[in-house]
Amino acid sequence: MSVIEPSILPASSLLQAYGAGSGYADCFVTELAGATTLESFVEAFYTSPLFKVERAMLRWLASRPSSDLDARDLATGARTMFAAWSVEARSSDQLLLADFTGRTRSWLMVEPFESPARTRGTRLYFGSAIMPRRDKRAGREHMGWAFHALLGFHNLYSRMLLRSARTMLKRQA
């Protein structure tokens, strides 16, 4: 698999709890030849050229600076805060981050596999969750017009981010 594909969330996903109810959760997956650790994936993801653009915007627009060293420390578990996110949950194969507003989550996961031809590889997963806003007047939750207006861009950008991380990992191999 050289493409980025939408996927259902794996049953063991730390993002699973956010996929139910009135919120939104997505999942994208790609495969990479050889073994890749979560640490390598996280570092590649957050230091990729595309994500560096997002980091620059966060530094400028939200006063949330970050560096490649910060990304490396996040990857190894030496840091629990990174740019606009903090670690909500972590396991040996997954990382779940919550943004500073508490409305969005970012999730990364690695899963080793063996193909029918007995070659080993790693599935790389990336997903997001967005929590609804509570309408105080109506007493119900809703996603809002901005969510619906930007969903297409969000899905494209998610695919591009995963592809960028995958490209970095392929170059390192």
Image: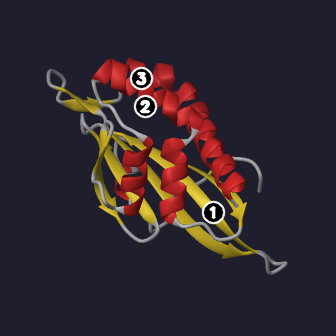
Distance of mark 1 from mark 3, alpha carbons? 29 Å
Q: Which of pointers 1 and 3 lies earlier in the amino acid sequence?
A: 3
Q: Residue 65's spot in the image, x, y percent? A: 33, 31
Query: Residue 169 falls in which quadrant of the image?
Result: bottom right
Circle 3 residue: 57
| Marks 1, 3: nearer the viewer | 3
- What element does badge 2 sit on? helix
Amino acid under label 2?
Answer: Arg
Question: In whole angstroms, how far apart are the C-alphas of marks 3 and 2?
Answer: 5 Å
Give the residue at the far front of this rendering. 69
What residue is drawn where x is 36% and y is 37%? 66
Coordinates of residue 6 in the picture (x, y in percent): 63, 48
Residue 24: where, in percent of width, then height?
Answer: 42, 41
x, y (%) of residue 158?
A: 56, 38
Task: Name the front one of labels 2 and 1.
Answer: 2
Q: Which mark is residue 123?
A: 1
The amino acid marked with disc number 3 is Met
Contact (CB < 8 A) between labels 1 and 3?
no
Mark 3 in CB contact with mark 2 (< 8 angstroms): yes
> Does the image show residue 24?
no
In this rendering, is residue 116 above or below 146? below
Residue at 37 percent across and 54 percent down: it is 74
Residue that lies at the very extreme toward the bottom in this rendered image: 118
Q: What residue sits 40% from the left and 47% below the top?
A: 69
Rate crowding at label 3 as few (under 14), some (14 to 19) or many (20 or more) other CA atoms within 10 Å: some
User: In the picture, which quadrant includes the C terminus?
Assistant: bottom right
Q: Secondary structure at mark 3?
A: helix
Q: Is residue 101 left or right of residue 136?
A: right
**Numbered badge on residue 55:** 2
Mark 2 neighbour class, 10 Å CA radius: few under 14, some 14 to 19, many 20 or more: many
